[in-house]
Image (cartoon, coloured by chain):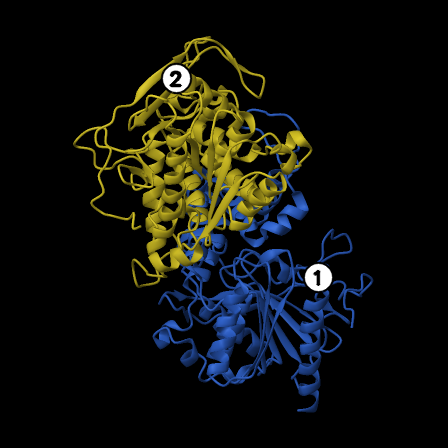
Chain colours: A blue, B yellow
Amino acid sequence: MARLTDGAASVGLVEPRLAHYGQPITLQCKATLPCFDLVYETYGELNAARSNAVLICHALSGDHHAAGYHSVDDAKPGWWENCIGPGKPIDTAKFFVVALNNLGGCNGSTGPLSLNPATGEPWGESFPAVTVKDWVMTQAMLADTLGIDRFAAVIGGSLGGMQALQWAIDYPRRLAHAVVIAAAPKLSAQNIAFNEIARQAIQADPDFLGGRYFEAATKPRKGLMLARMVGHVTYLSDDGMGVKFGRELKSGDLRSAQDVQFQVESYLHYQGTAFSERFDANTYLLMTRALDYFDPALECGGDLVKAFSNVAARFLVLSFTSDWRFAPERSDEIVDALIAARKDVVSATIEARNGHDSFLLPNERYFDVLGGYLDSVAQREASA
Amino acid sequence: MARLTDGAASVGLVEPRLAHYGQPITLQCKATLPCFDLVYETYGELNAARSNAVLICHALSGDHHAAGYHSVDDAKPGWWENCIGPGKPIDTAKFFVVALNNLGGCNGSTGPLSLNPATGEPWGESFPAVTVKDWVMTQAMLADTLGIDRFAAVIGGSLGGMQALQWAIDYPRRLAHAVVIAAAPKLSAQNIAFNEIARQAIQADPDFLGGRYFEAATKPRKGLMLARMVGHVTYLSDDGMGVKFGRELKSGDLRSAQDVQFQVESYLHYQGTAFSERFDANTYLLMTRALDYFDPALECGGDLVKAFSNVAARFLVLSFTSDWRFAPERSDEIVDALIAARKDVVSATIEARNGHDSFLLPNERYFDVLGGYLDSVAQREASA
């Protein structure tokens, strides 16, 4: 089953919607948010039994715009267009797909750029720390709003996969399947160190202004660019970068130490600069902190098997050979703990050379495994 | 043969010396330096035949102070104290050890902090680009000054190993052995990308002032700290960091996104801050550029075997299992090319968990292999 059909249909024009929650919620950090909004999109149709909904959880820099186009002039579709749509692995002909921007985000949901009702000023750096557990709780509130009692699947890659994992632990009866892609049960010291470098780069930028940059109508562009460059290098594999850039010089001569010279450098500059324009620095700090804190086994004294004891969902766990940020061994930890907890799990390690980024890129075996698994989910739900 | 004896003797008090070169030299970038100084130290005694000298080439942030103490109050000895001294792997009872600060450095040799005779001002960012080839050329000039026609061995780790490699290519008759530790025949795109992030961090610091920070009596401390943090994370292995720091929190609670929280973060801050005080930013830019440019096969159309065709030195090539910056496979490339060029090479991959940093740390098998090899070098030179 070749799912890499270039001409595959898109979900087409889509429109973000806003869900408003007027009641205060208490976050894991004990702070209270008086109210909040979640921006989301849906693709496909919810069936009469309301049993075909799947939730897409985004990673560090993602948002609710996972597929389709916002206007006919859009240069780019949603971030997972290659995977979500009619006939695609996450098949909108079968599933009602829900994608949202997480709490604390910067693309429409309540976050550091939003006004704090208590002050009338943007929250900025004072926005409370949010965790994966908080995201899952607010995603469950969105499910209530949409009349979805139980998701056929909760799906995510990287930080998104951690949300799928947390869903299975926190709401065992509200999802049938958890699809955990390129994730880990918790970050390693190295992962945390790279995140900390990114945070330091942002905070060291003089335009960060202690997180109140918006008051001066500026933003820490250089810091965000550096943060993204660090992220980018760790998302890609050494081999993948070699294939893409080799050691090609942009200029063949020795120049002074301040010039851009290798292709890979100019690519990273470009990517970093584009990111710094579209992303909010306080959100980046908050998202990387949520990543660092994620450790669902902590409440069970570090015992992941015990953390999984009440899980009822079936799992698909996928990893990629060249991913060194969340290596296949980290996925194995999840799989091993699920097996030890006597849960139902299918797993695969996909041969791919694009490192951690592989979870976002088309790959025949990846799409066959994911699409095949979700086909069986659809059949199971239809016959339930 | 256990060489890890805690009570092993030190070379004791040592004094740096300065060699001045008053004639202009032309660098690989075609720029001319009107004159320059090299600061160096020596340990042990040069024998009557002048045949027992070994040259130590330093890595990115090293210098001429490789062993011993500058005063009785010194808190720390030279950077390779565990490896150089009487009875140590680089045995000063057998060898006359020469260590220098490379051209472009910031610890006494001519570099960006030195005055440009043409302007009377520090060179700063206008110091010409230097390459590994330039370093080897100036090291050969230092050998002339010391009356050393031929080194028994040229030894270096990381960027230092690249210098040993270049020595064997450029001066085949001036060294008997090349000891290349934790190196690579050239950098990968990923290596270059990490260096570029470090450079961007320095240049984005408002105190960098286009490289003229010294005129304002300041320095880009935050940029240098970030650069060092990036370096540090890539020098260590994921496992090694895990063992050292795990995910230990400095504070157990969720705090705001701006606090230092994990042990690993506070370690990196400390290391980065200390480095930013002792190292010059322009030198860091220049050293990383030299690393990026290193590619001795380039002149031979990318054919490393051909680049080695005139090599006469015997090689010892060492790598470390957990080193992902210059992985054992990169050392294998050197070994394979030497074998294909029908050269004499001994190699070993040392089981070690400290990543690239392993080349600086005591390790029984590492010291046995290195010490054993150098013992045979000493015997060979004595019987020659």
Please rate how many residues cluster around mark 1, counting C-alpha atoms within 10 Å: few if below 14, some from 14 to 19, many from 20. Answer: some
Residue visible at 40% across and 68% down in the picture: A27
Q: Is residue B246 left or right of residue A251?
A: left
Please give the label number shown on residue A362: 1
Residue B57 visible in the current orientation: no
Residue B11: which quarter of the image? top left
* Picture quadrant of residue B170: top right
Q: Amino acid at mark 1?
A: Pro
Amino acid at circle 2:
Gly
Q: Residue pushed farthest bottom? A: A384
The correct choice, above or below, for B104 with respect to A21 in the image is above
Q: Are marks 2 and 1 in contact (CB under 8 Å)?
A: no
Secondary structure beneath disc 1?
loop
Q: Residue at x 43, y 79 (%)?
A: A305
Picture quarter containing residue B232? top left
Pointer 2: what residue? B147
